[in-house]
Image (cartoon, rainbow, N blue to C red):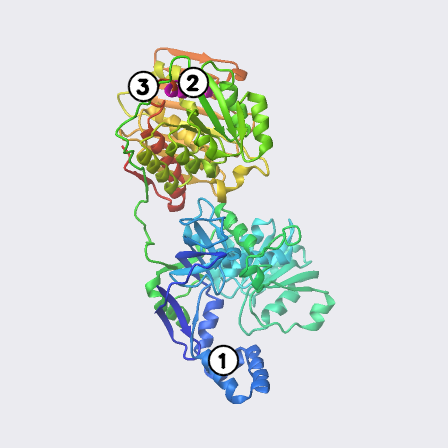
Amino acid sequence: MKQVVQNYKTGELALLDVPVPGCKPGGVLVRTAYSLISTGTELMKVSEAGMSMLGKARSRPDQVAKVVQSVAVNGVPATYRKVMGKLDSYTPLGYSLCGVVEQVGDGIDDVKAGDLVACAGNEHALHAELNWVPKNLYAPVPDGLAPQHAAFGTVGSIALQGVRRGEPQLGDVALVIGLGLIGQLVVQLLAASGARVVGADPDPVRCELAERLGAAACGDPGSPAVEQAVAELTGGLGVDQVYLAAGGESNQPVELAARLSRDRGRVVDIGKCRLDLPWNAYYEKELDVRFSRSYGPGRYDPEYELQGRDYPVGYVRWTERRNLACFLDLAARGRVDVEPLVSRTADFDDAVETYRSLEGGGLKAVAVLFRYPGQTVEAPAPEVAVPAVRSGGPRSAPARPAGTPVRLAFVGAGNYATSMLLPHLAGRDGVELSTVVTTTALSAANAQHKFGFAGATTDLDAVLGDASVDAVFVVTRHSSHAELTRKALLAGKAVFVEKPLALTEDELAGVLAAVEESGNDRLQVGFNRRFAPLLRDASERFGARTGPGHVRYLVNAGRLDHGSWYLQQATEGSRFAGEGGHFVDTASRLLGADPVSVYALTTPGGEDLQVVLRYPDGSTATIGYVTTGPAGFPKETIDLVADGRALRLDDFVRASVYDGRKRWVSSRLPKARDKGQSAQLAAFVKAVRTGGPMPVPLESLVATTAATLAVRAGLAAGVPVTLAGAR
C-alpha cells in the first residue's frame, strides 16, 4: 500500500510503498476513503523539516532540552547517533480521516466489515491507504453524512474540545482569533451553542467565510473593526471568552485577548501561538487562562488510546471518542457545515505535489482533502443490488392434515409482539402457540402465561430442531432479524419476520443464500399495511391504471422517547431503515410494481426525510418521513393520483376515491383503526396450513428491503440510487 512520509532531516516528502498493517486485537483495519490535511499543524511540521539543523533547534526548544539531557546521561557520541538516526528516517503525516472497515480485530463488537468510520490519531489516522485504528480512536459515521465530510472528525473534535474548555453559555459573546481550519469550526460550534461570535484574522477571505458560517462580525486584528464589533455586542464590557486558534511567533493574539476580554473572562489556547502573557493586563482582569489538549480527555493516555480502556461517563462526560462521535452527529444534522471549508480535493497519488503547493503558497487553502483510489469527484450514480431470487418461483409445501393445528414458535416477546401480533393469534382456530423463545427466562414465562404458549425457553436451537414447529416468528431487535431468519429458513421452517428483513446488503444476500441453499422460500415480512381493509377496499374502488401514477405518502413519525433502543443506530440501524419498508411496500402495492431507483434528501438537522421512488412504468412515489410534526396530526396520510382519479387514505380510519363524477367514502372510528395486522397473520397462517404461496412474493419483499437500504446510500451520495437488478 502507499503512505505519505517525510524525512525530517532532509525535508524530503514521498509517497512510499509500505507493508499493510496487521489487524491487531482491540481495533479495526480501515481502508481510507478521504483524509484531511491539517493546513496548520501538518504544514508547520513540513516547514520545520525543511529548515537547517539550527532552525530545527530554534523551532523545537523542547527537543533540544531532551538532547542536552541525553548528552549528560549517555555522552555526545551515543546521543549524536541516536538523534541523527531518528532524524534520518521516515515519519508519517496525517491524523484525520474517514474510511471503510476492512477487518475487525478480536474484542471489537461495535462495528463490522463494510461500516464507515471516522478515525483520529497521528499514529493511526495517517495519510495511508490502510490504517489500524484502536477502538477509542474511531467512531461510526451517522447516516446521511458524506465520507469526505466525516474526514473532518478529528479536527472537529479539537475545535469542540476547545469550545468545551471555554464553557460558553446562551447569550455569551466570544472572540475567535485565527480563522484557519480550527478557527472556522470553533466559530460554527459557538454559534450553534447560542453564543455571538466575533472573528479576527488578517485574511479578508477567511473573515468573509467566517461571517457566512455564523460569525456576527470579523476583521483584521490590527484594525479598529474588531474592537468596535466587541464594544457594540457587549456594551463595552468585553467578551466572555477568547479562543486562540492562531499560530506563529507574534504575541499579538494574547495581547488582543487581554484587551478585549471582560473582567474575569476566559482565554482558551487551542492552537500553537506565542504565549508571552502581559502580566499586568491578565492580572488586573484576573483572566482565566486555559489550555485545550487536542481531541479531549484520553489524549496521550496509552491505556485509553491503545488498550481501549474508557473513562466512566459519570466522571468524564466527553472523552476523545465521545467528542469525535458528537462532532460527526453535529455535522450529520447540519449544525456544522464543513463543505465551505474544502478548498481542494486532490487525488492521493498527487499527495507530494499538493503538499509542495501548500508549502510554497501556490495553493491557499483552509482545508484540503486527499481522495483515495475508488473515490471520484463526481462519482457515478451509486447502485444497491436487488439480489436475484433463484428459487424457481414460489414453492408450495405439504398441506397440514385436516384438523391438525398450525404450530407457531415466537422468537422475541417484546412490546410489538405482545400488543400487535399475539392478540390476533392467541385463541385463533387452527393455531397452536407452541414455544416462546426469549433471552431472559422471566420474559418467556410472562409471555407463556399471558398468551398460552405450550412451552417457554431461552434455547433457540431446540426450537429450530423441533420438527413439530411449523413456523417461526422473528420479533426481536432489528440487528438480529436477518441472522435469525437465515437460521430458521435453513431449519426448514416457514418464517414470519417483523420489518426490517435486513439492515445491510450483505445481510439481505445472506437470507437469499439460505433460501437457495435450503430450497425453502416460505418467508413473510411484517409489511402489514398492504393488508389493511380500508386500503384494499379503496384500491378495488380505484381500479386498474392505464397510465403512470403518483403516490404521496406523509408519515408524521414524531419524536422518540429518550432512551429508546431505536436511537441505537450503530447497532440497530437508522429509524427509517427499521420502519421505512412499511411505506415503500405500501406505495409499491398501490402502484402494482417494485421500484427501480431511489432518491433521498434530508433536512439540515437530519431529522426529516424525503424519499422519491421511481417505478418501471414511470410512476413515482414520494414518502415524506417527518419527526417534527404536531402530535395531534394524523400519523399517515396517503394519496394516489392516476388517470384522472384520486385515492386518499387518512390514517387508516377514512378512505376516499374520486373519479371526477362521483366520490366513494368509507370510514371507521379511530379506535377501530386497522393497519392490517390481523388480515396479514390470517393470510400467513393460511399459507402455512394449505402449503400455498406466501402472501407476498419473495421478489417483492427483497425489492422493498433493497429500496429501503438504498435510502442511506442516496443520502450519502446526494444523487439517485439505481436498484440494480430490479424488475
- Residue 305 visible? The answer is yes
Residue pointed to by mark 3: 644
Say whether disc 3 or disc 2 marks the residue closer to the N-terminus: 3
Residue 682: in magenta span: yes
Asked if labels 2 and 3 touch by Cβ distance under 8 angstroms, the answer is no
User: What amino acid type should be assigned to the residue bearing mark 3?
Assistant: Gly
Say whether disc 2 or disc 1 marks the residue closer to the N-terminus: 1
Residue 581: image location, x then y, percent: 41, 32
| Residue 466 against residue 281 in the figure, above or below | above
Asked if labels 3 and 1 touch by Cβ distance under 8 angstroms, the answer is no
Res 311 quadrant in image? bottom right
Residue pointed to by mark 1: 56
Res 230 quadrant in image? bottom right
* Distance Cα–Cα, label 2 vs label 1: 79 Å
User: What amino acid type should be assigned to the residue bearing mark 2?
Assistant: Ala
Regarding mark 2 in the picture, which secondary structure is present there? helix
Magenta extent: 675-688
* Distance Cα–Cα, label 3 vs label 2: 35 Å
- Residue 369 visible? The answer is no
Residue 270: image location, x then y, percent: 58, 64
Residue 697: in magenta span: no
Mark identifier at residue 564: none
Quadrant location of the N terminus in the rendered image = bottom left
Mark identifier at residue 682: 2
User: What amino acid type should be assigned to the residue bearing mark 1?
Assistant: Lys
Say whether disc 1 or disc 3 marks the residue closer to the N-terminus: 1
| Frontmost residue, 725 versus 440 | 440
Quadrant location of the C terminus in the rendered image = top left
Crowding at dot 1, Cα within 10 Å, few <14 / some 14-19 / many 20+, comes out as some
Mainly helix, strand or loop, the magenta region? Answer: helix
| Frontmost residue, 277 versus 215 | 277
| In the displayed structure image, the side of residue 461 where residue 645 appears, left or right | left
